[in-house]
Amino acid sequence: KSTRSDPKENDSKNLPIYQHKAKLIQAVKDSTFLVITGETGSGKTTQLPKYLHQAGFCKDGKIGITQPRRVAAITVAQRVAHEMQCTLGREVGYQVRFDDCTSESTEVKYMTDGCLLREILADPVLPQYSVVILDEVHERSLNTDILLGLLKKRLSNPAKATKGRESPLKVVVMSATLETDKLSAFLGDCPVFAIPGRMFPVTSTFGFAVGPKDLESTGYVKEVVKVALDLHTSEMAGDILVFLTGQSEIERACDMLYEKAESIDYRYDVQDQTVEGLLILPLYGSMPTDQQRQIFQPPPPGIRKCVVATNIAATSLTINGIKYIVDSGFVKQLNHNSRVGMDILEVVPISKSEAQQRAGRAGRTSAGKCFRIYNKEFWEKCMPEYTVPEIQRTSLTAVILTLKCLGVHDVIRFPYPDCPEERFILEALKQLYQFDAIDRRGRVTRLGELMVEFPLHPGLTRALLKAASLGCQDLLLPVAAMLSVENIFIRPGHPEKQKEADTIHRALAAKTGSMNDFATLLSVFQSCKSSDRPSAWCKDHWVHWRALKSAFSVETQLRDILLRLQQKRDFPVETFEGNKSELFRRCLCTGYFTNVARRSVGKVFCTMDGHGSMVHIHPASSLFDQEGELHWIIFHDVLVTSRVYVRTACPIRYEWVKDLLPKLHEVDVYELSSVARE
Ligand code: ADP
Ligand code: MG
């Protein structure tokens, strides 16, 4: 057995970035903007902040590193804290939405791009930082793109760049792929530092199973499992990385893999006799962090590791030792759906450049192989060349409000790295107007200034503020918190068990005196919170305890924000006569009148926002099978399959939205747009 001296230190000295340490530090010192590129895994994310820390950059401020993904911010911070031998949250910390693990002594701070945007809102000069590193810029996340535009706007003006600061802020932009010329041009032709990578060749093969006809099918999960097992039995030792789209799919694939791997007879079935077992590990964003750590550990001798991951493993997290890739060809993406006028998480084909990025994960330590389960025709007909930046495919309502609050009045001519379509900007302005966040001239209202403080969807914030002005925030805060965490309800899968779970959830809603899905959320929150044994309570009621614990923490944080705002003098105050259930639902209406639907025939509802989409009640909703008694509903989100389903829904009376509905049509977007152009 080999002896291990100090694995961390040796590892990090072997990374490609290590040889460039001195030059990198110098390059950061020499310029305001610097673009750094390098193959995934070369050490950019974990090492550069460490180098800058060692070089004394923390003397006049922190080093902040943004990540588009929450799980990446947390995982990388853990790793770097470990490498620097400090406790997470002390010198090295992280901050993601609703989870702040930093302290007074934090000098290296990993965070989501959304968090940095909030800090800019609090103080555009960012006096607490000496260096800001925007990481994973090639991902083109909405918030990172906005940050790029804001920092460019600010720092390309020398007078502004130093105003309110001892020394000018340094901005480093890191990206895995080759859009660097464009990036550098965008940032005033700033220098580019390319870390030469070591990459071994990867051979990619196309499959037969998935073609253009299978776009809507989820049969790829089964196919991916089959290919991974074939590979396990027929290929030489080396770890496998499987790309799928989301948690439930990944768990299903892992279950199938476990089951099938049981029946392998290692004496006869496997080609490489040194392979004696398979270790199956899921990897997705909302996974418990202790489970995540295993992903990076080398497997025991003779055991092949098989990581089944979302796109997070494409560039955000590098797993060493991967020799084989199984690519499903799909990814889960947030897209603006013009059929329903909302953003929807959809499973869509990846782009060709994304497929190449995935394949590249196999060639880090030696030559690798990538098995694509789709055929050449799918590649040619269904997969776009490049991934469309998020800013060009999702709702801009929240960021436009942020920009306006930062004093960017002309949101059409803002320096976006890639311009969104004008109609997306107009739609955002229109929505902000409908929520009373901006006035007819496109100026932020008092309410808009309050709304921007909440890291929530503007509609939800609107409802919450309405409740607060009526003094009934205790009804809405839990709902807002519950809608901000993932997977509250356990879905047992088994039909009988599902029925049992549904009955329990409906009984909880009934306890609040009104039967709707928002009331269910409120009731789950309150009942669990007042229970003596909350984790047992969750088990009995088919609720995820981990999700509920986060909801408790989110609620406290939202309450703190609200309290802070309420202490200011001009917080709006209103009164209301009526019962609690009506009050609750009327508050919801203020935020969700853009999502109103009216029953037309049978079980079909028609939305009133001008799209006139046909929607159905989802079987998981407490309103399912009650459609006959309903006339008007509001809803939080939709699920699009062959039909459009509303999930979190609530019956309302027409009178409650009567005065609000005209707002959906009254505003002339051209008026808002001409203001935006002024
Ligand atoms: P880049 O940002 O250039 O893609 P990283 O800094 O993320 O590279 O990764 C550098 C190396 O550190 C990789 O080999 C990766 O496997 C390793 N690494 C990163 N995070 C961890 C972790 N949590 N545990 C073990 N190794 C890690
Ligand atoms: Mg990285």
Image: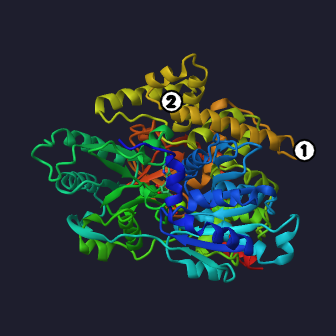
Residue 297, x across and y down, in percent: 42, 45
- Which residue is denoted by mark 1 in the rendering? 569
Residue 278: x and y in percent read 26, 44
Q: Secondary structure at mark 2?
A: helix
Vertical relation: 595 (above or below) 146: above
The amino acid beneath tag 2 is: Trp
Q: Amino acid at mark 1?
A: Arg
Asked if residue 56 is positioned above or below residue 668 in the image, the reply reads above
Which circle, 1 or 2, is nearer the viewer? Answer: 2
**Foreground of the two, 39 or 464:** 39
Residue pointed to by mark 2: 545
Give residue 534's position: percent from left, percent from top.
54, 22
Could you tell me which quadrant the N terminus lies in? top left
The percent position of residue 431, horizontal first and vertical second, equals 65, 61
Q: Is residue 195 above or below residue 132?
A: below
Residue drawn 76% across the image and 36% down it: 576
Of the pair 501 and 596, the residue shown nearer to us: 501
The kind of secondary structure element at disc 1 is loop
Q: Quadrant of residue 618?
A: top left
Can the viewer see residue 372 in this picture? yes
